[in-house]
Amino acid sequence: MTQTKKNVAIIGSGLVGSLLAIYLKKYGHTITVFDRRPDIRQVEFSGRSINLAMSNRGWKALREVGIDTEIRKIGIPLDKRAIHVIGKPEYFQKYGKDGEAIWSISRGVLNKKMIDLAEQAGVEFRFEEKVWDVDLPNAQVFTGETEKGAWTAYDFDLVFGCDGAFSRVRHKMQRRSRFDYSQDFIDVGYKELTIPPNADGSHKLDKNSFHIWPRGQFMFIAMPNLDGSFTCTLFMPFEGAVSFESIRTKEDAVQFFSTYFPNVRKDIENLTHDFFKNPTSAMVTMKCFPWTYWDKVALVGDSAHAIVPFYGQGMNAGFEDIYVLNELIRTHGDDWETIFRNYQEMRKPNADAIAELSYRNFMEMSSKTADPLFLLQKKIEKRFAEKHPEKWIPAYSRVTFSDRPYAEALAEGDFQEKIMKDVMAMPNIETIWDSQKVEDKILEALKDSVH
Amino acid sequence: MTQTKKNVAIIGSGLVGSLLAIYLKKYGHTITVFDRRPDIRQVEFSGRSINLAMSNRGWKALREVGIDTEIRKIGIPLDKRAIHVIGKPEYFQKYGKDGEAIWSISRGVLNKKMIDLAEQAGVEFRFEEKVWDVDLPNAQVFTGETEKGAWTAYDFDLVFGCDGAFSRVRHKMQRRSRFDYSQDFIDVGYKELTIPPNADGSHKLDKNSFHIWPRGQFMFIAMPNLDGSFTCTLFMPFEGAVSFESIRTKEDAVQFFSTYFPNVRKDIENLTHDFFKNPTSAMVTMKCFPWTYWDKVALVGDSAHAIVPFYGQGMNAGFEDIYVLNELIRTHGDDWETIFRNYQEMRKPNADAIAELSYRNFMEMSSKTADPLFLLQKKIEKRFAEKHPEKWIPAYSRVTFSDRPYAEALAEGDFQEKIMKDVMAMPNIETIWDSQKVEDKILEALKDSVH
């Protein structure tokens, strides 16, 4: 299909904004990316971000524009979880089949690289230029020093809001009637800490693992960086008996880490300093609809669907938005109204599904890991999946290592859950869990379904 | 408890804002009410509003400050529904027991009266003064001609956001972290029309009835005014086979009303003109939390919980907020932090409950009224309630004619629904619906419960 050259504004130079710029530039459009922040390449990156886990959907979107090889150089493959339980040696859980891995990448490093690549392709970046308003029907963008000060108006043909969970573009769309919107914060916050490299530059923990210290209501994780360090994140309730609120002094912090994370406490850099210096951040699920305004404006990535990070799919979902958008551009050429309408109709159910899956993972981690019946169920599922890998693909694999729609992963997961509910109701399941009877029951349930 | 005199701002001079002003003035506080619109008493009221149905909760709140008698003079009691089915005479359904009625009141007339009463009590109104921002920790209010122009700052001790579903005060709170928020529009819109009085000033339809023309996916209602007219509202999907979108010409409008509302079509004033002149309005359920900011700011009424109008409880719920707030002021005196914390904790579950009940009523009206099994269930419930009025209080009565918490009405309704699900599963329920066996089954279910 033909593509008439357009004058395109992208609001936000984050991962989604810069990748979208690379995609659209291939069609010869004129691309201007606005960002209210300074050029990330020229400032020390302050990482208010969980390290990223790039998985199949992300790689697929990068491959499409030929930059996956370049990006792999700044990532570290993690093929397993390393689980740290108090008083026991760490143990490992492989993520998937051989060769399947998620990739640990620093958000800052990746973002700098993507902006470089976009700039090399001819994209113009306007940093420290704050977008305050968008005239939706006219694709006009207004920028200025302050919200109340003088503004500059820019005319575009298309405007993409890639400005994240607190999007200014969406904010404008939200004022229209019949715009559905929700933001729901969870009661758990997160704080980043660092484990520095050894003196020789090597990693203090296994480099190719996603490290996790599950503790029921809270947990600590660590992901490797190229320089030998680990970016760590403590997830914990804001309020309550064990909570961010309850850790008030340096002694509290040391006591907390000594009690719950003894094997790693002394490795954390400046623990008592960083714990109080680094912010405690909140996490939100944001949903909205519609995502587009006629043939003029579209939201892509977190601005359309922000999710909690417990499935590691935030960036992957945003990149998949771009991949799908690009498929639609190929099919429908200049018909941006059709492109945008199909885009939101195809992506909305999948965005809702990964939001739900991510929220459920949070609930599982924070409340179910202490439930022996839940753990038994997981053991039965694992056993069955190992014996019948083609019949039982875990939801995690569908989400992480396939490119089938998120909505399908959610539906299949629900179906498996229904089967397992019957299995767990079998008499004496605690003793017969690894019997042929249980296996047969699952096989029967799978066969019965017209699924 | 003592009450230190405070300097209080109320944003919004609507029904909730003006009643709250009357309540707070009784404690001797200095009250300033801001409204961006002109004084409603000095402009022709353009009624973008469904006529109000004042029921028990509303009256109770008015009685508390001794203005119920005054307000009753501008209302008309409706003790029954008048149901209009095509080709049959209208038939009547009594709302409750003898003497129980909802009251039809014009929003404009009521609002004017309430502002008069507040002004007489010494409340200052500042009309056409637009509030653009609120400094929450300092209870400071900023007003100005335009959002970008010069602003005036006012210092207060307390700020109440009574500025409706699209509240500016809430908008400011919403920018804070960990503020939960949702807005969900329904696919049905509404349009107001008028049936004028007879030449002698009398009503063209029964004056003491809530008139309803149920048509499945859409419906038409009419509520009486003091001047002999009826305010009518057409509820209908925005899009689809029979929808606002599908009525494009005057001929379409006449055809539509002739087909579906033949008994009343010719009574509607300027039908073909007004249908296109009057706006088609959207309806939203808005939820948020928290409702307050420390001891400084509180949201009251629609700004905290906007609901769809299908239970006639929007204003009643807002007035009940004020009643509860006042009880807490009496108990806790000057401790506004405790007052506000208790207020939101007590009211939030009830606001969520009436939102849910209102939404369900919409779903019932728009999709279930055509389902014969649903109608049979309602018939069984009605029969049982008539025989055992003390054992089976319909949810509608709990909501409309009692002051028990909305959350209780919702829970009791769910319990009744569970019983009826078993009843409807009885073999041959279509033929045995009025048998002793059915009655006994309900009695048994009610007895079994520890409810």
Image (tube, coloured by chain):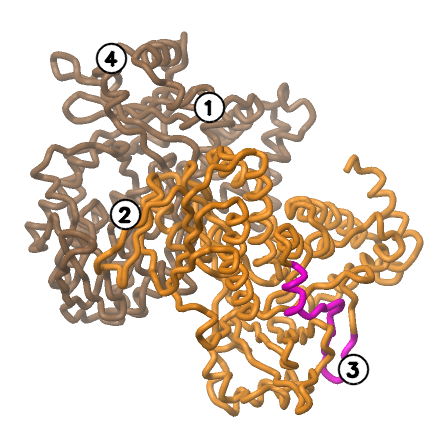
Chain colours: A orange, B brown
Checking the image for residue B191, the label placed there is none
Neighbourhood count class around disc 2 (C-alpha, 10 Å): few under 14, some 14–19, many 20 upward: many
Residue at left 43%, top 42%? A6
Where's residue A437, x and y in %? 91, 51
Calculate the distance from the C-alpha at mark 2 to the C-alpha at mark 4: 33 Å
Q: Is residue B354 visible?
A: no
In the figure, is residue A427 to the left or right of A415? right
**In the rendered structure, which amino acid carries the disc numbered 2?**
Gly
Q: Earlier in the sequence, mark 1 or mark 2?
A: 2
Work out whether disc 3 and disc 4 sit on a shared chain: no
Q: Mark 4 = which residue?
A: B267
Image-based side of A326 in relation to A373, left or right: left
Looking at the picture, how far across and down is residue B434, in whole percent? 57, 23
Q: Chain of mark 1?
A: B
Marking on residue B164? 2
Please identify, in this view, whether the residue under mark 1 or under mark 2 is nearer the observer.
1
Report the magenta residues as a range: A68-91
Labels 2 & 4 near each other (Cβ < 8 A)? no
Q: Residue A427: x percent and y percent? A: 84, 54
Q: Which chain does the residue under circle 2 lie in? A: B
Q: Are marks 3 and 2 in contact (CB under 8 Å)?
A: no
Sequence-wise, the earlier of marks 2 and 4 is 2
Which chain does the numbered disc 4 sit on? Answer: B
Marks 1 & 2 on one chain: yes
Q: Is residue A428 magenta?
A: no
- Of badges 3 and 4, nearer the viewer stands 3
Disc 3: CA contacts within 10 A as few (<14), some (14-19) or many (>=20):
few
Residue for badge 1: B240
